[in-house]
Image (tube, grey):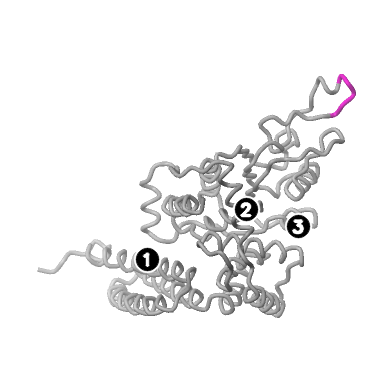
Amino acid sequence: MLKELNKLEAELNTQFPERRSVVHGALAAVIINEHVLLLGPPGTGKSALVRAIATAFGCRYFERLLTKFSTPEELFGPISLKGMEQDRYSRITTGKLPEAELAFIDEVFKGNSAILNSLLSLVNERLFHNDGTAVTCPLVSMFGASNELPEGKELEAVFDRFLLRFDVDYLLRPTSFRAVITASEPSVATKLNRAQLTGAQKEAAAVKLTDETIDAMITIRDACRTEGVTASDRRWKKLTKLVQATAYLSGADETMPEDLSILVDSLWRDPKERPKLAKVVGRIADPVGAQANEILDAARETATKVSALKATDRKKYVAEAAAAMDIFNQQQAKLTGLAKSAGRRAKHVVGDAIGEINGLHAELARAVSQGLGLGMRVAK
């Protein structure tokens, strides 16, 4: 099962560039029957990714966009007219959320009280109350999407049900953008059946949670409190399963502190908190990966500054472009050195950073070779 899961993850990473952490987190969530929130603007591939995962696992899939005018019938099914003739108030749930194994609810925080109350019970307890009877639902994971953070206690309860939260923005790298706009619609060739998914879930649950990992988690919890970031004991308990799933996907039979890096996308309340959390968690769980991300952030900042000069100051752009390419070379050398001491997760982080900086270097070199992208003629 693990081999197929790794193939699926690699395929999804190819289909959805710059979404490695989202892809990994989504698969980990499915393995432990948890839910994922994708926060960000429309047109960033959120629904396409969830559909691809549902197709890969052969899951019964349900998708719905909520508005302030949405009714419970849209999610849970219409009232049975035959039931009403018998003084029963039951819903026909065929093809609706109560019978889905994987679901995508867009604008999930737009639902009214009637929808949200039923939704909470369904995602947390896997129960749907139909005419006074608690019906067990087969839901594996629900993916929610929103353009904005929720406000109000009622919505906070829904927000808390998402164990993983990702801030999904538009693509940054020109190479990624080029690949996406020239590619066909995302589709995956790797397929797993429901029995294979159940087997993977059992194997992930059997991964040993080491004392070293637990000690590091306690240190992270205390450090987060110092930074004003808190989470409930219930949430920390669920996060141990997420860490086990992360270790499992990497091929390990026991956890290690660097598997705690996924906590960064489990603890923030506002995306603005994520950079702070990344430093706190990275320093404790994966120092090498944290250093690689800092180098990558510096490279992105350099590329942005140089790009801003492209249409305003040609002479300065030439000088800054040359200096930036030298900086990129130095950063790649640092990353190559870091790779020598990297753990299993950090190797991927370092590799991704090297790949992105290579792309930034190539794009800048292409602009220079084409007359700096400014329509300049080469002197004779």
Q: Which of the marked residues, 1 or 2, is nearer the chain's N terminus? A: 2
Q: Is residue 337 magenta?
A: no
How busy is the neighbourhood of tag 2: few (under 14 within 10 Å), some, or many (20 plus)? Answer: few
Of residues 1 and 97, the one nearer the viewer is 1
Q: The residue tagged with tag 2: helix, strand or loop?
A: helix
Picture coordinates of residue 250 (x, y %)? Answer: 51, 62
Q: Position of residue 296 (x, y in %)?
A: 44, 72
Secondary structure mostly taken by the magenta-highlighted segment of the chain: loop
Query: SS class of the residue under badge 1?
Result: helix
Q: Quadrant of residue 38?
A: bottom right
Note whether 281 is above or below 55 in the view shown.
Answer: below
- What segment carries the magenta color? 85-89
Left or right, 364 with reference to 119? left
Disc on the earlier residue, 1 or 3: 3
> Does the image show residue 186?
no
C-alpha gap between disc 3 and disc 2: 31 Å
Residue type at numbered disc 2: Lys
Cα separation between marks 1 and 3: 38 Å
Q: Looking at the image, is mark 3 or mark 2 earlier in the sequence?
A: 3
Residue for badge 2? 202
At x 48%, y 73%, the residue is: 343
> Pointer 3: what residue?
156
Please give the label number shown on residue 355.
1
Q: Quadrant of residue 25?
A: bottom right
The residue lying at 36 percent from left, 58 percent from top is 175
- For residue 64, say whether it is visible: yes
> In front: mark 1 or mark 3?
1
Disc 1 marks a residue whose amino acid type is: Gly
